[in-house]
Image (cartoon, grey):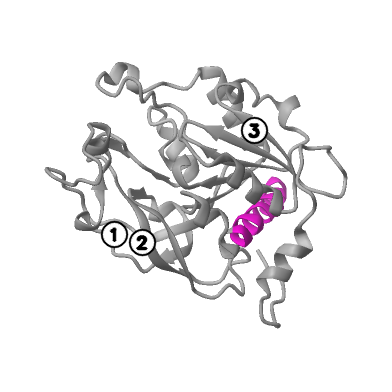
Amino acid sequence: MQSNDMSEPLDIDKDLEDGRKPGNQTFFKNDTKNLLVVTRGHPFERDNFFNMIDSLGFDWSHIEHPAAQSFFKKENLKKFDAILFYDMPGLNFDEIKDDSKFFIKPPQEYKDDFLERLSEGKGCVFLHHSIAGWPMWDEYSNIIGGKFLYKSGNIKGKKSPDSGYRHFVNYKVSSVGEHPITKGISDFEIEDELYLSHVFENDINPILKSNYTFVRDNFYSATNALNGKLNSNEGWEHPDGSNIVGWTKSYKKSAITYLQFGDGVKSYENKNVRLLIRRSINWVVKETKELKIKI
């Protein structure tokens, strides 16, 4: 992909303002990208999150699980240019003691529909906790490019401990290489949640990294949290992890972006985060069109 000419310094306020239109449910205009936003499975501050979505300059519609699982038919998605996932399906937190009930398999029809849409070409942007979705569907993590485990499990055929989390981390974000999504964005500070989880570095193109140190002592066990021991790493071991917090990749004929940002209001209101999300949506739409021609 060729990036836009950024010979002049980036003005984030202007960049966002140029793309901002009154956010609303989709009217399927010809001159505005139409975005489908998918949520549910993890709590979030709805008003603040949707205010952020409003600011991005797209027409958008919102759907929640489980309704989303019957919505991925071709005729339903054909008018949407891209999908933004801020969901975490496949986990029942009312049944954390019984794995047969805690882990929920996605319906086969939904899996088939999802993969068919990606084979046809549909750009996808995944945010924050979406990396923990559908733990019983291995291919889902291959689509995203990483996986967060609430309980120990298998990652690409190898046993792995549960993942780690840390809230309210103040860290610096830097670009990795050059990419249209990050072009012209200087290093910036943010307070957000970080994960010590699996990033499939051999399968992705990293675009953003954190200066935080991703080691066991700096994170807390997800399983301990499930068992009522919040902010605890007692009895938990985990190998050192990746400091990559944003990446792109492709899956079949679809362009994919993952951004780890998005735990709460400070992240939603961060101008750099908003710009990165907006650019990610634009990039997956454009790149998917090119993939449909190439493949």
**Kind of residue indicated by mark 3:** Arg
Badge 1 marks a residue whose secondary structure is loop
Quickly name the residue at label 3: 117
Viewer-side label of 2, 3: 2
Above or below: residue 197 compared with residue 67: below
Viewer-side label of 1, 3: 1
The image quadrant that residue 50 belongs to is top right
Badge 3 marks a residue whose secondary structure is helix
**Kind of residue indicated by mark 1:** Phe
- In the rendered structure, are the residues bearing label 2 and label 3 in contact, judged by CB atoms less than 8 Å apart? no
In the drawing, does residue 20 fall left or right of residue 256? right
Quickly name the residue at label 1: 214
**Kind of residue indicated by mark 2:** Asn
Q: Which residues are magenta?
A: 274-295
Residue 160 among magenta residues? no
Quickly name the residue at label 2: 243
Q: What x and y, as percent, mark residue 204?
A: 46, 54
> Which residue sits at x=44%, y=34%?
133
- In the rendered structure, are the residues bearing label 1 and label 2 in contact, judged by CB atoms less than 8 Å apart? yes
Above or below: residue 127 compared with residue 88: below
Instruction: Decide which of 196, 204 is in the foreground and name it.
Output: 196
Whether residue 124 can be seen here: no
Above or below: residue 207 compared with residue 67: below
